[in-house]
Amino acid sequence: MHLRRKLVAGNWKMNGSLAALAELGPVADAARAAGGVDVAICPPFTLIAPAVTRAGGAIAIGAQDCHAHESGAHTGCVAVGMLKEAGAKLVITGHSERRADQHETDAEVRAKAEAALRGGLLTIVCVGETDAERRAGSHVGRVTTMLAGSLPEDWEEGELVVAYEPVWAIGTGNVATPADVAEMHKAIRTHLVGRFGDRGNRIRILYGGSVKADNAAELFAVADVDGALVGGASLTAAAFVPIVEAAAG
Ligand code: PGA
Protein backbone atom coordinates (compact mmCIF):
# COMPACT_ATOMS: atom_id res chain seq x y z
CA MET A 1 0.00 0.00 0.00
CA HIS A 2 1.13 3.54 -0.74
CA LEU A 3 2.58 5.36 2.24
CA ARG A 4 -0.07 8.08 2.12
CA ARG A 5 -3.41 7.38 0.44
CA LYS A 6 -4.91 10.50 -1.11
CA LEU A 7 -7.68 12.27 0.81
CA VAL A 8 -10.13 14.59 -0.94
CA ALA A 9 -12.17 16.51 1.64
CA GLY A 10 -14.96 18.94 0.83
CA ASN A 11 -15.61 21.92 3.07
CA TRP A 12 -19.14 23.17 2.51
CA LYS A 13 -18.60 26.18 4.83
CA MET A 14 -21.95 27.88 5.59
CA ASN A 15 -23.63 26.37 2.54
CA GLY A 16 -25.98 23.47 1.97
CA SER A 17 -29.40 22.24 2.97
CA LEU A 18 -31.22 18.95 3.35
CA ALA A 19 -32.05 19.16 -0.36
CA ALA A 20 -28.38 19.67 -1.23
CA LEU A 21 -27.51 16.32 0.37
CA ALA A 22 -28.74 14.78 -2.90
CA GLU A 23 -25.29 15.74 -4.23
CA LEU A 24 -23.78 13.06 -2.00
CA GLY A 25 -25.26 10.20 -4.03
CA PRO A 26 -23.08 10.62 -7.12
CA VAL A 27 -20.08 11.53 -4.94
CA ALA A 28 -20.50 8.25 -3.03
CA ASP A 29 -20.71 6.35 -6.32
CA ALA A 30 -17.50 8.05 -7.51
CA ALA A 31 -15.75 7.31 -4.21
CA ARG A 32 -16.62 3.62 -4.50
CA ALA A 33 -15.56 3.51 -8.15
CA ALA A 34 -12.31 5.41 -7.56
CA GLY A 35 -11.05 3.05 -4.85
CA GLY A 36 -7.74 3.88 -3.20
CA VAL A 37 -8.90 7.43 -2.37
CA ASP A 38 -10.46 8.63 0.87
CA VAL A 39 -13.37 11.02 0.30
CA ALA A 40 -14.88 13.26 2.96
CA ILE A 41 -17.46 16.05 3.15
CA CYS A 42 -17.73 18.53 6.02
CA PRO A 43 -21.17 20.17 5.92
CA PRO A 44 -22.55 22.57 8.54
CA PHE A 45 -23.20 20.94 11.96
CA THR A 46 -26.95 20.60 11.37
CA LEU A 47 -26.42 18.46 8.27
CA ILE A 48 -23.88 16.01 9.71
CA ALA A 49 -26.32 13.34 10.88
CA PRO A 50 -28.50 13.32 7.74
CA ALA A 51 -25.35 13.43 5.59
CA VAL A 52 -24.03 10.32 7.33
CA THR A 53 -27.25 8.53 6.43
CA ARG A 54 -27.05 9.69 2.80
CA ALA A 55 -23.34 8.88 2.41
CA GLY A 56 -23.85 5.23 3.24
CA GLY A 57 -20.27 4.72 4.41
CA ALA A 58 -18.61 5.62 1.10
CA ILE A 59 -17.91 9.20 2.18
CA ALA A 60 -16.63 10.15 5.63
CA ILE A 61 -18.69 13.00 7.05
CA GLY A 62 -17.09 15.58 9.28
CA ALA A 63 -17.40 18.97 10.94
CA GLN A 64 -15.77 22.33 10.23
CA ASP A 65 -14.89 23.10 13.83
CA CYS A 66 -15.14 21.73 17.36
CA HIS A 67 -14.66 23.00 20.90
CA ALA A 68 -11.62 22.01 22.95
CA HIS A 69 -13.72 21.09 26.01
CA GLU A 70 -16.00 18.10 26.47
CA SER A 71 -18.99 20.09 27.73
CA GLY A 72 -19.85 23.20 29.68
CA ALA A 73 -20.97 26.81 29.48
CA HIS A 74 -19.91 27.58 25.91
CA THR A 75 -23.01 28.85 24.15
CA GLY A 76 -23.15 28.02 20.47
CA CYS A 77 -20.21 25.62 20.50
CA VAL A 78 -20.13 21.91 19.73
CA ALA A 79 -17.97 19.30 21.49
CA VAL A 80 -16.11 16.40 19.88
CA GLY A 81 -18.31 13.81 21.62
CA MET A 82 -21.38 15.45 20.12
CA LEU A 83 -19.85 15.34 16.65
CA LYS A 84 -19.08 11.66 17.08
CA GLU A 85 -22.62 10.96 18.25
CA ALA A 86 -23.85 12.59 15.04
CA GLY A 87 -21.61 10.24 13.07
CA ALA A 88 -18.68 12.55 12.25
CA LYS A 89 -15.39 10.85 11.50
CA LEU A 90 -13.30 13.99 11.00
CA VAL A 91 -13.07 17.66 11.82
CA ILE A 92 -11.38 20.68 10.27
CA THR A 93 -9.58 22.91 12.78
CA GLY A 94 -7.97 26.30 12.34
CA HIS A 95 -9.47 27.17 8.97
CA SER A 96 -8.31 30.66 7.95
CA GLU A 97 -11.90 31.91 7.94
CA ARG A 98 -12.23 30.95 11.61
CA ARG A 99 -8.81 32.38 12.41
CA ALA A 100 -10.00 35.65 10.81
CA ASP A 101 -13.70 35.78 11.77
CA GLN A 102 -13.50 34.18 15.24
CA HIS A 103 -9.93 35.35 15.97
CA GLU A 104 -8.77 31.80 16.68
CA THR A 105 -5.14 31.65 17.77
CA ASP A 106 -2.60 28.91 17.17
CA ALA A 107 -2.95 27.85 20.82
CA GLU A 108 -6.74 27.53 20.48
CA VAL A 109 -6.37 25.56 17.27
CA ARG A 110 -3.93 23.23 18.99
CA ALA A 111 -6.32 22.69 21.91
CA LYS A 112 -9.14 21.89 19.49
CA ALA A 113 -6.94 19.51 17.49
CA GLU A 114 -5.83 17.76 20.68
CA ALA A 115 -9.45 17.30 21.76
CA ALA A 116 -10.45 15.98 18.34
CA LEU A 117 -7.54 13.52 18.20
CA ARG A 118 -8.28 12.36 21.77
CA GLY A 119 -11.78 11.63 20.52
CA GLY A 120 -10.35 9.51 17.73
CA LEU A 121 -11.29 11.82 14.87
CA LEU A 122 -9.24 12.43 11.76
CA THR A 123 -8.20 16.01 12.43
CA ILE A 124 -7.28 18.44 9.66
CA VAL A 125 -5.22 21.37 10.95
CA CYS A 126 -5.18 24.28 8.46
CA VAL A 127 -2.29 26.68 7.98
CA GLY A 128 -1.50 29.22 5.27
CA GLU A 129 0.00 32.62 4.65
CA THR A 130 -1.66 35.83 3.51
CA ASP A 131 -0.94 37.57 0.24
CA ALA A 132 1.14 40.22 2.06
CA GLU A 133 3.24 37.56 3.78
CA ARG A 134 3.94 35.84 0.47
CA ARG A 135 4.85 39.10 -1.23
CA ALA A 136 7.21 39.86 1.64
CA GLY A 137 8.85 36.47 1.13
CA SER A 138 7.96 35.35 4.66
CA HIS A 139 5.44 32.66 3.64
CA VAL A 140 7.51 29.63 4.61
CA GLY A 141 8.47 31.14 7.96
CA ARG A 142 4.87 32.11 8.65
CA VAL A 143 3.51 28.64 7.90
CA THR A 144 6.25 27.00 9.96
CA THR A 145 5.35 29.24 12.90
CA MET A 146 1.69 28.30 12.52
CA LEU A 147 2.59 24.61 12.48
CA ALA A 148 4.78 25.01 15.56
CA GLY A 149 1.89 26.61 17.45
CA SER A 150 -1.13 24.75 16.05
CA LEU A 151 -0.09 21.09 15.91
CA PRO A 152 -0.36 18.89 18.98
CA GLU A 153 2.86 17.69 20.55
CA ASP A 154 1.70 14.10 20.68
CA TRP A 155 -1.40 12.04 20.07
CA GLU A 156 -2.41 8.42 20.59
CA GLU A 157 -5.76 8.27 18.81
CA GLY A 158 -7.18 9.62 15.59
CA GLU A 159 -5.17 10.79 12.61
CA LEU A 160 -3.45 14.14 12.18
CA VAL A 161 -3.67 15.72 8.70
CA VAL A 162 -2.24 19.11 7.71
CA ALA A 163 -3.91 21.33 5.11
CA TYR A 164 -1.86 24.05 3.45
CA GLU A 165 -4.32 26.72 2.38
CA PRO A 166 -2.81 30.02 1.28
CA VAL A 167 -5.35 32.65 2.30
CA TRP A 168 -5.00 34.46 -1.04
CA ALA A 169 -6.02 31.30 -2.91
CA ILE A 170 -9.19 30.54 -0.94
CA GLY A 171 -12.35 31.28 -2.88
CA THR A 172 -10.50 33.60 -5.24
CA GLY A 173 -9.81 31.37 -8.25
CA ASN A 174 -6.10 32.19 -7.75
CA VAL A 175 -4.70 28.73 -7.31
CA ALA A 176 -1.10 28.41 -6.15
CA THR A 177 1.31 27.27 -8.85
CA PRO A 178 2.73 23.74 -8.64
CA ALA A 179 6.10 25.32 -7.82
CA ASP A 180 4.61 27.32 -4.92
CA VAL A 181 2.86 24.22 -3.65
CA ALA A 182 5.97 22.06 -4.02
CA GLU A 183 8.07 24.54 -2.04
CA MET A 184 5.58 24.76 0.81
CA HIS A 185 4.67 21.09 1.04
CA LYS A 186 8.38 20.22 1.17
CA ALA A 187 8.87 22.73 3.97
CA ILE A 188 5.87 21.31 5.84
CA ARG A 189 7.17 17.75 5.43
CA THR A 190 10.57 18.82 6.72
CA HIS A 191 8.92 20.40 9.77
CA LEU A 192 6.81 17.29 10.42
CA VAL A 193 9.74 14.87 10.15
CA GLY A 194 11.96 17.14 12.23
CA ARG A 195 9.34 17.24 14.92
CA PHE A 196 7.73 13.79 14.85
CA GLY A 197 10.46 11.63 13.29
CA ASP A 198 9.30 8.92 10.90
CA ARG A 199 5.72 9.47 12.01
CA GLY A 200 5.98 12.80 10.17
CA ASN A 201 6.37 10.90 6.90
CA ARG A 202 2.97 9.31 7.39
CA ILE A 203 1.06 12.57 7.98
CA ARG A 204 -1.00 13.53 4.94
CA ILE A 205 -0.56 17.09 3.66
CA LEU A 206 -3.50 18.48 1.69
CA TYR A 207 -3.48 21.51 -0.54
CA GLY A 208 -6.49 23.83 -0.44
CA GLY A 209 -7.40 27.03 -2.27
CA SER A 210 -9.38 27.15 -5.54
CA VAL A 211 -8.92 23.46 -6.31
CA LYS A 212 -11.10 22.66 -9.33
CA ALA A 213 -11.55 19.88 -11.86
CA ASP A 214 -9.15 21.57 -14.28
CA ASN A 215 -6.21 22.03 -11.89
CA ALA A 216 -6.59 19.02 -9.56
CA ALA A 217 -4.52 16.51 -11.51
CA GLU A 218 -1.60 18.93 -11.79
CA LEU A 219 -1.70 19.62 -8.04
CA PHE A 220 -1.98 15.94 -7.11
CA ALA A 221 1.14 15.23 -9.17
CA VAL A 222 3.25 17.50 -6.92
CA ALA A 223 5.47 15.70 -4.41
CA ASP A 224 4.03 15.66 -0.89
CA VAL A 225 0.53 16.66 -2.04
CA ASP A 226 -1.54 13.92 -0.45
CA GLY A 227 -4.95 15.27 -1.37
CA ALA A 228 -7.04 18.40 -1.31
CA LEU A 229 -9.33 20.44 0.87
CA VAL A 230 -11.98 21.77 -1.49
CA GLY A 231 -14.43 24.58 -0.79
CA GLY A 232 -16.55 25.92 -3.65
CA ALA A 233 -16.01 22.94 -5.92
CA SER A 234 -17.27 20.52 -3.27
CA LEU A 235 -20.81 21.90 -3.30
CA THR A 236 -22.00 19.99 -6.35
CA ALA A 237 -21.25 16.47 -7.48
CA ALA A 238 -20.60 17.79 -10.99
CA ALA A 239 -17.68 19.88 -9.71
CA PHE A 240 -16.43 17.50 -7.00
CA VAL A 241 -16.49 14.11 -8.71
CA PRO A 242 -13.77 15.01 -11.28
CA ILE A 243 -11.49 16.04 -8.38
CA VAL A 244 -12.06 12.66 -6.71
CA GLU A 245 -11.32 10.98 -10.03
CA ALA A 246 -8.14 13.02 -10.48
CA ALA A 247 -6.95 11.86 -7.05
CA ALA A 248 -7.49 8.26 -8.11
CA GLY A 249 -5.07 8.92 -10.98
P1 PGA B 1 -12.04 27.10 -2.09
O1 PGA B 1 -11.95 26.92 -0.50
O2 PGA B 1 -11.80 25.72 -2.69
O3 PGA B 1 -13.42 27.61 -2.35
O4 PGA B 1 -10.97 28.05 -2.48
C1 PGA B 1 -11.02 26.08 0.10
C2 PGA B 1 -11.16 26.09 1.60
O5 PGA B 1 -11.39 27.17 2.17
O6 PGA B 1 -11.05 25.04 2.26
Image (cartoon, grey):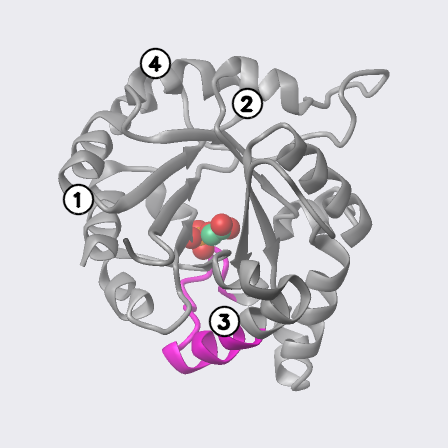
* Real-space CA distance between mark 2 and mark 1, rounded to the nearest whole angstrom: 27 Å
Q: Secondary structure at mark 3?
A: helix
Q: Give how far across and how far down residue 31 sits, in percent.
A: 22, 37
Reply yes or no: does residue 239 show up in magenta.
no
Q: Which numbered disc, 4 or 2, marks the residue closer to the eye?
A: 4
Q: Residue at x 28, y 65 (%)?
A: 215
**174 over 42 or under it: above or below:** below
Mark 3 and mark 1 in contact? Answer it, CB < 8 Å: no
Q: Which residue is mark 3?
A: 185
- Counting from the top left corner in percent of width and height, residue 132 is at 67, 76
Per the model, the C-alpha gap separating discs 3 and 2 is 30 Å
Looking at the image, tell me whether mark 4 or mark 2 is earlier in sequence order. Answer: 2
Q: Label 1: which residue? A: 34
Residue at the front extreme of this rendering? 198
Q: Disc 4 marks which residue?
A: 53
Which residue type does callout 2 highlight?
Phe
Q: Which residue is painted at 60% across and 36% down in the image?
A: 157
Could you tell me which secondary element the residue under label 2 belongs to? helix
Label 4 residue SS: helix
* Tag 1: amino acid: Ala
Instruction: Give me the C-alpha separation between circle 3 and circle 1.
Output: 25 Å
Depth check, mark 2 against mark 1: the one in front is: 1
**SS of the residue at dot 1?**
helix
Q: Nearer the viewer, residue 49 or 237?
A: 49
According to the picture, the residue beneath numbered tag 2 turns out to be: 45
Residue 207, percent from left and from top = 45, 61
Label 1 packing within 10 angstroms: few (<14), some (14-19), many (20+): some
Query: Quick one: label 1 or label 4, which is nearer the N terminus?
Result: 1
Q: Is residue 2 left or right of residue 138?
A: left
